[in-house]
Image: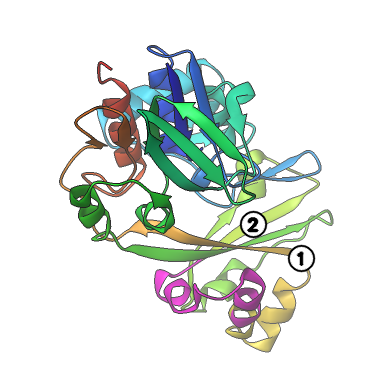
Amino acid sequence: MKIAIIGAGFSGCNLYDNLKLQFEDITIFEKSRGVGGRLSTKYIDDKFIDHGTPFLIPITEDLKSFCSDLVKNKVIKNRYDEFLPINGMNKICKFLINEENLKTNTKIIEAKFIDNKWNLVDENNNNYTGFDKLFLTIPATQILEMNIDLEENIKNELEKINYDSVFSLILYSNANLKLNENLVYENSCVENIINNSKKYLYKDFSSYVIHSSRKFANEVNTKTKEEILEIFLNSFDEKTKEHLKTFNLIPHLWKFAFVKNSLDMSYYLNESKTLGICGDYFNFSNVEASLTSSELLGSVNF
């Protein structure tokens, strides 16, 4: 059988890891340059900057067990109740898949079920045909934006899902600068600051990630990341603004960062088992939900 997965975030990659026990021919389509979703990592030369989820703090036994396996395989390391990346958070997703089966920079905009096969079309009008099963692991809003054959019942459920956004600002320097975090925290638009250099024990490289409040990001999430950067910098007093600009700055908008409301089901699978959907908007809304939803869908006997 020929399988397609749309989305190479944590849900999609973990689904792949589970489905490979049943299927050999699996292709993952990802619109971005690499895997990870909110477990993404920026590379500055040979340095790693995790600008989404900085580490994992498992609550459920399932995620604790998952993290323990990653520790054994030297993908992450344990520090107290936290599990930290060794070479970037995105290595978690890379560990779960065979990258030979990954198509990046490929945004699927159409999925039609014709003659018992799924035929996909990307934004550049390239066709990918003959898939027996299709699995969607992208945000609900992005599914609804596709031209896709969806049953009315699941379409209605997906329309109920709403998201909070988060704006992330990466700061880095080879000059080993120190960010005045107390000064930055005076701005109510700031939710938290991650000292990325401290996490990786970098001595000759400074890197921080500032995450905005959801309120700030929700108000600007229709603008470009460059426009948001200007608005964000202007929300600081002049002294702090100039301090931030001593670093190299990279803006990023997580438009679908947090699910506001989740569906009362673990995953979706149509009656013919030809279309499945999983993600963090099933049951509850965090990385634990992504793990549970993708593992349960991936363990179905197809």
Where is 195 relative to 242, above or below? above
The C terminus lies in quadrant: top left
Taking the view exactly as shown, the residue that stands out farthest to the left is: 264
Identify the residue at image location x=56%, y=76%.
223
The kind of residue tagged 2 is Tyr
Mark 1 crowd level (few <14, some 14–19, many ≥20, 10 Å Cα): many
Lateral position of residue 32 relative to residue 139, left or right: right
Upstream in sequence: badge 1 or badge 2: 2
Lateral position of residue 77 relative to residue 213, left or right: right
Q: Give the range drawn in magenta.
A: 212-231
Residue matched to label 1: 247
In magenta segment, residue 224: yes
Q: Is residue 140 visible?
A: yes
In magenta segment, residue 124: no
Where is 7 relative to 66, above or below? below
Lateral position of residue 211 relative to residue 173, left or right: left
Residue matched to label 2: 208
Mark number displayed over residue 1 = none
The kind of residue tagged 1 is Phe
